[in-house]
Structures are given as C-alpha cells and as structure tokens.
Image (cartoon, rainbow, N blue to C red):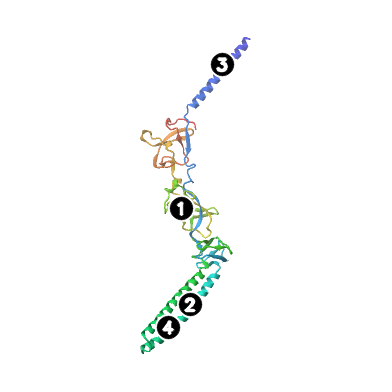
Amino acid sequence: MNKNKVVIGALCVALLLFSSGCGTQKSQTDKKPLVKTMVIGEGQKGSDTSFSGTVHGGYESALAFPVGGRIVEKYVSSGQHVTAGQPLFRIDSKDAEETANAAEGKLAAAKAQYNLAKTTLARFQKLHDIDAISDMAMDQTRSQFELAQAQLDQAQAMVGRAENNLNLTVLTADRSGVIGNTLFEVGQVAGPGMPVAIIVDDSTKEVNISLTEKQYSKYSVGMPCTVTFWALPDVVVHGVIKEIAGTPNPSTGTYDAKISLTDAPENVVIGMTAQVSFGDTDMNKIIVPLTALDGKDGKNKVWIVDNNKVRPVIVEVGKYTSDGIEIISGIKKGDRIVTAGIKQLTDGEEVRL
C-alpha cells in the first residue's frame, strides 16, 4: 500500500514539472513581438504600369449621305480595303435623275430664249444706229435680253445643283483605308447625315487605353511605352502617348488615352487586343507603407526580417505616393520588411510573423 502511494506521488510530481515546463515555453513564445511583414517586389507591379487596350486606326470617320433615300447598291463589306473616291453605297436616284432632267430641259429653253434675245438685240442695235427705231424700243429690247441672260444663269445654276444632288446619291470613301463597319443594307432607308459606314485609316495605328483618377497624374503626352499583342506574342512595338482626355469619359469615369504606335508591322491589325507597358514608373520603384518607416534617432530606417530575427537598415527615402513612400536605397526587392509593430523592436530580436 505504501509502495503504491509512493508511485502515485512520483507521477504527480512529474506531471507538475512537465506542466510548468510547457508554461515556461509558451510564456517565452508569447514574449516575442508579433509583427506584420511584406516582401519587397511582391504585388507592386502591373496595376499602374500595364494597361489593356484595343488597336484602332489613327483616323476613323463615320460616312453619311447628305441627302436621304433608300439604299439600292452596297459595294463594300466590313474589313474591305478601299481607296479614296471609291464608291461605297448608292441610294435610289430616281427623284434626283428626274430633277436633273427637268433642269436640263429648262436650261435648253433658257438657252434658246437667250440666243433669240441676243439676236434681236443685235438687230435692233443696228436699226437704232440709223434712227430706224425709237430709244424706248431699244431699251425694251435690251431689257428683254438682260432678262433672258438672267434666266439662263438661273437655269445653269439649277442644273449644277441637280447634278450635284445626283452625285450625292453615291457615297464614296473620303480617304484610303479599311471599312471598319457597315451600318446599312440594301433596301433600308438612310436619312440625311445618318452614318452608314465607318472607314478607318490603317496606315497609322493607335491603342486606346483608360486611366483612373489615381493614374491620371502619373502619365503625360510624349511618354514612351512598349506594346505587345495577345495574338502576336513575339511582336513588341514602341509607342508614345499621343493624347490624354482632359475630362473623364461619362460612360466609364476614366480618362481616355491614345497610344501612337511608331513601328507597327502589317500583321498588327485593327481590333487586336494589346498590352501597353510603361517601364519608367512605379513598377521599378520600391514603395513601402508609411507604417514601415522608423524615424527614431533622426534617421530613416526599416526593419528587415531574416530567419525570424529583425535588424534595422538605414534607407534613403524619396517621394510620398498614394501607396506609401518611395525607398531610393537601403533595401532591395526580395527583402522581407516589417510593416506593422516596429515601435518596440530591437536589433537581433526574434519576432513572430
């Protein structure tokens, strides 16, 4: 019996000692400062330096008939290359032809009347010279000639307008390029000024991108970039910002920007998806949160974590940004730094992540 009591007592003592040891280890672990960290270079690129866009022509125009009518001929289709002056569509010209024919008839009558008045004036002038007719008769003849001349001028102008209206029934390309889209088919009625086709000058190419309010101030006209294409992975084209809108697009709330492609090959075609990258922006800079900067002792430092131990490193700071502050020197990409919990750290101290 006494022997059993001794064994039980020994077990109790052992359990107490084990429990005490565990508590000591836990207490020592709890004393290590808990910090938040980040690795320099992770998640710091892409959003503000690379943009998706679409290839467009350097010039795009919506073509329309100045006069309305039913479309009776369609000579082109989307994607077709055309030259300046090439016919694209024709509307019903019956009314215009009738008007032109009527104007020609009136012109012929006006010419006949003019010729008669001219002959009469010449004959009366000879009679007047020998006092065979009165001054009043001569004046009336001259007035009839002047009226015939005015009517001839008016008839010629009417023919000109009629021929012009007849020509307006054929819509031609205002420049060489590619048909981006056709908006009407044969049989449909197009009103005056209503776009029926989009022509794109593909001799020069651009990429349209969008900038947020945050990105707007970082970019300016003339800034260079490189452009790649989803469908052409081996093609890299140089570009430059040609234009940035001064006001946001009401549909998207972003600022439209145009990238001019300086050396695009022929296999870069309108409509391709492009990626525009700017090399000299925040992507190549080290930006850390303000909470990572330790300014004690009048020196700017950050704390680097290596094997769960911290050490301070003096850094040179640059400009403040919306994401934090730029670090010019002192740390490099791949370093793990403390971003929260720097106040009580000491050199060489072990921390919990």
Callout 4–callout 3 Cβ contact below 8 Å: no
Give the residue pinned by disc 2. Answer: 107
Q: Quadrant of residue 325?
A: top left
Instruction: Tell me if residue 201 can be seen.
Output: no
Helix, strand or loop at label 4? It is helix
Distance from Cα at disc 4 to Cα at disc 3: 144 Å
* Res 25 label: none
Q: Give how far across and how far down residue 24 sits, in percent.
A: 51, 22
Q: CA distance from mark 1 to mark 2?
A: 55 Å
Of callouts 1 and 2, the N-terminal one = 2
Find numbered disc 1 in the image and state the secondary structure of the residue it sits on.
strand
Instruction: Give the residue number, with chain letter if any, for mark 4.
Output: 118
Q: Position of residue 97 (x, y in %)?
A: 53, 72
User: Looking at this view, is 156 or 22 the one in front?
Assistant: 156
Position of residue 277 relative to residue 179, above or below, is: above
Nearer to us of marks 1 and 2 is: 2
First in sequence: mark 4 vs mark 2: 2
Q: Earlier in the sequence, mark 3 or mark 1?
A: 3
> CA gap, disc 3 to disc 1?
78 Å
Question: Is 222 left, or right, of 14 in this rendering?
Answer: left
Q: Earlier in the sequence, mark 4 or mark 3?
A: 3
Q: Residue at x 44, y 81 (%)?
A: 114
Residue denoted by label 1 = 257
Nearer to the camera, 146 or 202: 146
- Mark before the other along the chain sequence, 4 or 1: 4
Mark closer to the chain start, 3 or 2: 3
